[in-house]
Amino acid sequence: MSSKTNYSYIGIAFIILVFGIIFIPKIVDRIKNNDVSRSDRMSNVPDNHYSSKEKLAFLEINGEAKKVPEFSFTNQDGKTITNTDYLGKVYVVEFFFTTCPTICPIMSENLIQIQDRFKSIDNFGVASFTINPSHDTPEVLKEYAEKYGITNPNWNLLTGDREAIYNLANLGFNLYTAEEEGAAGGFEHSGNFALIDKNGFIRSRTDAYGNPKIYYRGTITEKAKYDEDGEEEEITMLKEDIKKLLNE
C-alpha cells in the first residue's frame, strides 16, 4: 500500500474523529432534552400544502390585524357570553343551526374530535353561533350539546338577535350566512372554521405566496380525508395550529 493511500485513510479517520468530538455530544444532549423525537420530525412535515413551521399569520385589513368584533349572546345554559369571556383562550368559531340536514353534523363531529384532543386544556374553547335563533333557543341548544357530547365548559352554543348574528357572520368574519328558501334546511352558510388567538385576533397559516389562509375547511373529517370534489380535510391542520397558539 502506498504512502499516499495511508495518508488518505489517516485524513478520513481524522475527519470522522473531529465530527464525533464536535457533533455527537450535541446530538446526545438534544435527545436527553427531548429536542429530537419522531413526533417532532413528523410535526415539521407540512400538510395540505401550507407551511406548518412558521408562526401563524394575522389577517390584516388596511394594515391592521383583524380582531373578533364585540358580541353578546345567550348560551345553552341561559348565560350571557361576550367576546371578553374568550380573552386568554384559543378558540374556534363556527356558524351552524341545529336542524341543518347537510354539513352541520359533519362540522359538529369534527369539533367534537377537536374538543377531545384538547380536553385537558383549560384555555381552549369553541363558539358556535346559530343562524336560526328563532328556533334554536337555549333549551334547543342544550339538547344539541347533549346529543353530540359537548362537555368543554368553554364551548358555548350561542343564540340571540338574528340581525346581530348575521352581521357578526357576514361582516365580522366574512363567513357567508343567509336565509334561503331553496337551500337545504332553509339556510345557506359557510362550512369553514375560524381560529382565534388568546388576544382575540383571527389567525391562520399562510399559503405559498405568503397570504393568510384565513379559514379551515370544517366539512371533511380526518377519516374521510377528501370530499367528492377532491378537497382535502383540514382538521389535522387546525389541531396543529390550535396547539401552536396555545403555546404562544
Image (cartoon, rainbow, N blue to C red):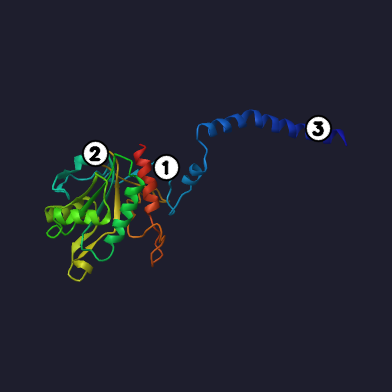
Disc 3 element: helix
Quadrant where the N terminus is found in the figure: top right
In the picture of the structure, the residue carrying the numbered disc 2 is 87
The residue that appears at 23% across and 54% down in the rendered structure is 146
Residue at x-position 34% and y-position 50%? 114
Residue corresponding to mark 1? 54
Q: Position of residue 116 (x, y in %)?
A: 34, 48
- Say which amino acid is labelled 2: Leu
- C-alpha span from label 3 to label 1: 46 Å
Report x, y in % for residue 60: 29, 45
Distance CA(mark 2)–CA(mark 1): 23 Å
Question: Mark 1 is on which residue type?
Answer: Glu
Indicate whether 213 appears above or below 177: above
At x 62%, y 32%, the residue is 24
Which element carries disc 1, helix, strand or loop?
Answer: loop
Secondary structure category for the residue under label 2? loop
What residue would you read off at disc 3?
7
Say if residue 205 shows up in the picture: no
Mark 3 surroundings: few (<14), some (14-19) or many (≥20) residues within 10 A: few
